[in-house]
Amino acid sequence: MTFLATEIRGLMDVVRGHAGALEVLIADELWPMPKCQEMLFIK
């Protein structure tokens, strides 16, 4: 469990940072998945 909390969590944060940067750069009509902002505030 410690491995997940220390190693994997850090890698997940890095991946999330890259995905967030891509969400900003790519136009909505070209991004096939819901963006984080959309998932947080589902209408």
Image (cartoon, helix red, strand yellow):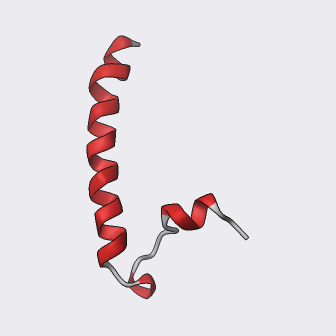
User: Residue at the spot x=36%, y=21% of the render?
Assistant: 4
Query: Based on the displayed image, in which of its 4 quarters is residue 23 positioned?
Result: bottom left
Task: Return the residue nearer the eye: 13 or 29.
Answer: 13
Apparent side of residue 32 relative to residue 4 in the rendered image (left or right): right
Query: Based on the displayed image, in which of its 4 quarters is residue 7 positioned?
Result: top left
Q: Residue furthest top?
A: 2
Above-or-below relation of 24 to 41:
below
In the rendered image, residue 26, in percent from the top left (x then y), is placed at: 32, 79
Above-or-below relation of 25 to 19:
below
Q: How many marks?
A: 0
Query: Based on the displayed image, in which of its 4 quarters is residue 11 positioned?
Result: top left
Above-or-below relation of 14 to 9:
below
User: Residue at the spot x=34%, y=31% of the render?
Assistant: 9
Q: Residue furthest right?
A: 43
User: Residue at the spot x=26%, y=45% of the render?
Assistant: 14
Quarter placement of the N terminus: top left
In the rendered image, residue 19, in percent from the top left (x then y), is placed at: 33, 59
In the rendered image, residue 2, in percent from the top left (x then y), is placed at: 36, 12
User: Residue at the spot x=44%, y=87% of the render?
Assistant: 29
